[in-house]
Image: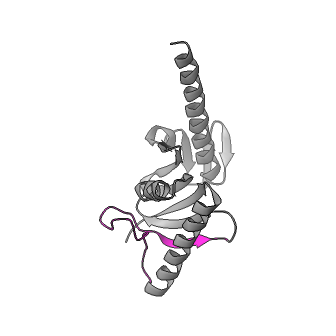
Amino acid sequence: MANWCRNTLAFEGNETALEQIKSKFRRMINLERSEQCGQLPDFVNPKVGVYFFDIIWDEGDCIFSCQTKWSQNTKVLVQIAERFNVDFIHDYEEMGNLVYGRSIYEDSILTEIDVDGEDFEKYQYDDETGIYYFEREAYDSDAEILETLLERKVRSRNENAQLLQIAMQFD
């Protein structure tokens, strides 16, 4: 039985493209319900893609949640973004395999930021009390800790990109 990776996807782009994506996901949601199996957009090669399961879209913004088996499906999301000329932010987690991160696709550039093994070692879990400890603080779950670690990496990556842009101006 597969471990399930939880995914949250937010697409950004012009309204026409976003409506096309919504339509594509509506069809996948309906097919999933009727066929009782995971779905991919029809333009994605099934041998390459990681299928979407339990797709949920709340009417309104172009934000979806879904599950995938074992890991995130960033390659499929890039294919969707390229096809419809949009950007996306993709948060994902599958704690059984220590998968936790964010993919950002902006201006045809993919940036992946993951909490890695070293990050997971920065906090401890006490089996007896059921409490997580991180930086001398106690937490009931590791969710807030992981979000903090990921946000630090995102912030650091953004700062490094800004420094690189400044350095390139002086070359």
Characterize the magenta stretch by its predominant secondary structure: loop
Q: Which residue shows up at 53% across the image and 23% down it?
A: 164
Q: Residue at x 52, y 53 (%)?
A: 85
Residue 153: image x %, image y %?
56, 37
35 left or right of 45 in image? right
Whether 78 is drawn above or below 164: the answer is below
Determine the residue located farthest toward the left in the rendered image.
Answer: 47
Viewer-closest of 31 and 117: 31
Magenta highlight range: 36-58
Q: Residue furthest top?
A: 170
In this orientation, which residue lies closer to the viewer: 129 or 124? 124
Residue 48 magenta-drawn? Answer: yes
Q: Quick one: quadrant of the N terminus?
A: bottom left
Q: Where does the image place residue 63, in percent across and percent down from the top left?
A: 62, 62
Please tell me in which quadrant of the rendered image residue 8 appears. bottom right
Q: Is residue 153 left or right of residue 75?
A: right
Judging from the image, the colouring scheme is one colour
- Residue 149 lies, in percent from the top left, at 58, 41
Residue 22 or residue 129, whichever sits in front: 22
Side of 60 where 10 appears, left or right: left
What number of labels is visible? Answer: 0
Q: Which residue corresponds to the image point at 59% horizontal and 71% vertical from the top-left? A: 56
| Residue 24, horizontal then vertical, whole percent | 52, 71
Q: Is residue 11 magenta?
A: no
The furthest residue to the bottom:
34
Q: Residue at x 56, y 23 (%)?
A: 165
* Rendered image quadrant of residue 10: bottom right
